[in-house]
Image (spheres, rainbow, N blue to C red):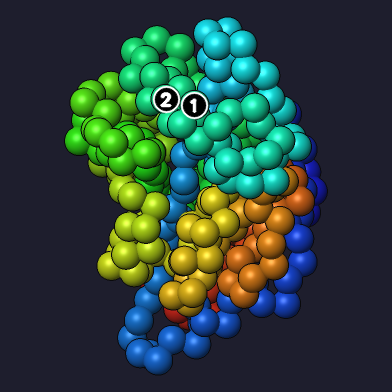
Amino acid sequence: MTSKKSSGLVLAEAPQSLDWPPASLINVADPQYKWARTVMFDLHGVIFDWESAFMAFAQSHFGYTFNSATRQFYDIGRDPSTPLSPKQFDDLFTQFARRSHGGYGELEPIPGVIEQIELIASAGIKPIICTWTPGANDLRPDGSTTFQTGIAQVVTDELIARHLGHVIPRQNVLYSSTSGKKHIMLAERIPLIVEDKTTTAVDVAESALAAILMPYPYNQITFRNILRLDATNQLASAVLNLFEGLDSAGVLAKS
């Protein structure tokens, strides 16, 4: 996939890797095993920018100011570059997740990502979303109690439908713990996930599946079966290159 413009977006080639698609996806012991033409996407930090909205909420309501570009750890409440303690983050996150307006339902797409998902879908690859978004019975980050409302999932459904309903219908939106994503992929023979969280990508890769990491300061790692992008406009190239390789190897299910 050469660099080109798509709906005003300048697409770029994914980083080169000698093991993309990973050999583990091609050299499956069962010769009858075929991978689904499906790619799993995380939602927050992959398709939608949740952190900017959370920072604006923290600043406008409590005066906390921090810059995600300097963050070196996924856990905001424990990153030394942010002014939030773990408890303050837990409390703020719970309040943010329980907002019917100005919270999860009004996040902005990461520039260019939706157009690239459309391009991936037009190539015959089914995109699905699998995300942890707090439900009524989910525990707060500190484990002290539950969120006691499912508003975050309700408004997230509406958000996805508004921006991506034409390519990702509601039945292809799954809510799961981060640890559950790998098991869904294995059960459904999904070869690839797009993530921002290092531990989820590594968990998937350790089961011989593949992961793409969107580029953030907190996920600069090198690990087998993980391709970390240099820029978000490399996403379509990375996904399509993997499926083209699987198709050429004869291990991809028919459309």
**Residue 91: image tag:** 2
Query: Which residue sits at x=28%, y=21%?
Result: 151
Q: Nearer the viewer, residue 72 or 10?
A: 72
With respect to residue 251, does 2 lie above or below? above
On the image, which quarter does residue 78 sit in? Answer: top right
Q: Quadrant of the C terminus?
A: bottom left
Q: Nearer the viewer, residue 225 or 217?
A: 217
Q: Is residue 207 visible?
A: yes
Query: Which residue sits at x=45%, y=12%?
Result: 102
With respect to residue 75, does 146 lie above or below? above
Q: Is residue 245 visible?
A: no
Q: Position of residue 144 (x, y in %)?
A: 28, 36
What is the C-alpha distance between the residues marked 2 and 1? Answer: 5 Å
Which residue carries the number 1 mark?
A: 88
Query: Which residue sits at x=33%, y=50%?
Result: 177
Badge 1 density bin: few <14, some 14–19, many ≥20, Cα 10 Å: few
Badge 2 density bin: few <14, some 14–19, many ≥20, Cα 10 Å: some
Q: Amino acid at mark 2?
A: Asp
Q: Position of residue 90 (x, y in %)?
A: 43, 31
With respect to residue 189, does 23 lie above or below? below
Q: Amino acid at mark 1?
A: Gln
